[in-house]
Image (cartoon, rainbow, N blue to C red):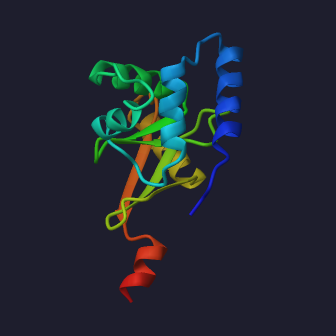
């Protein structure tokens, strides 16, 4: 399992926001902190419950606005198949998201597969399709869960 220095990541994210001329509000920062402390993806309403101790008046629009902002800045990936969110720790550059999602522990690991990127771009070009972004989600069993079941 990966452990992140949450305050270091948050400081990097704030620096990115400053360079881009956007604002990392206290609520956005807290959602970022919550996500950075998790290995597994989490749904918006579960995030909302975890946010309420620090932002007591938070409502569903609060969490969705924060998540939209974090996604736009590349700090968070949405796992569409499970309607959940996971932190991206290499938000300093745009990239394709390739997610390995464990069906047992619900852990998410982001990997990079240049061959998949290239193949998708070639297919898009072949079909005269302009890609805006791509996310690949693969579901299976992680090595930790696999070891526990053997």
Which quadrant is the C terminus positioned in?
bottom left
Q: In the displayed structure, would residue 87 be above or below residue 23?
A: below
From where the camera sits, is residue 148 visible? yes
- The residue positioned 43% from the left and 59% from the top of the image is 107
Q: In the displayed structure, would residue 111 be above or below residue 118?
A: below
Quadrant of residue 134 within the rendered picture: top left
Closer to the camera in the image, 1 or 140: 1
- The residue positioned 29% from the left and 41% from the top of the image is 83
Quadrant of residue 49 within the rendered picture: top left
Left or right of 80: which side holds 8? Answer: right
Instruction: Please tell me how many numbered marks the rendered image carries.
Output: 0
Residue 37 lies, in percent from the top left, at 53, 47
Residue 95 lies, in percent from the top left, at 58, 38
Residue 12 lies, in percent from the top left, at 70, 31
Left or right of 82: which side holds 118? Answer: right
- The residue furthest top is 21
- The residue positioned 40% from the left and 30% from the top of the image is 129
- The residue positioned 41% from the left and 79% from the top of the image is 146
From where the camera sits, is residue 87 visible? no
Residue 115 lies, in percent from the top left, at 56, 54
């Amino acid at each position: 399992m990966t452990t992140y220095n949450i305050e270091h990541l948050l400081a990097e994210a704030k620096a990115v926001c400053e360079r881009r001329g956007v604002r990392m509000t206290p609520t956005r920062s807290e959602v970022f902190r919550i996500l950075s402390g998790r290995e597994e993806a989490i749904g918006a309403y579960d995030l909302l419950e975890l946010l309420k101790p620090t932002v007591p008046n938070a409502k569903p629009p609060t969490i969705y606005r924060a998540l939209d902002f974090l996604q736009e800045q590349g700090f968070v990936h949405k796992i569409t198949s499970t309607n959940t969110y996971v932190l991206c720790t290499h938000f300093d550059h745009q990239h394709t998201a390739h997610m390995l999602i464990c069906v047992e522990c619900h852990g998410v690991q982001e990997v990079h597969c240049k061959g998949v990127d290239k193949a998708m771009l070639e297919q898009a070009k072949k079909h005269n399709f302009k890609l805006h972004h791509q996310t690949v989600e693969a579901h299976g069993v992680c090595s930790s869960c696999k070891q526990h079941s053997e």
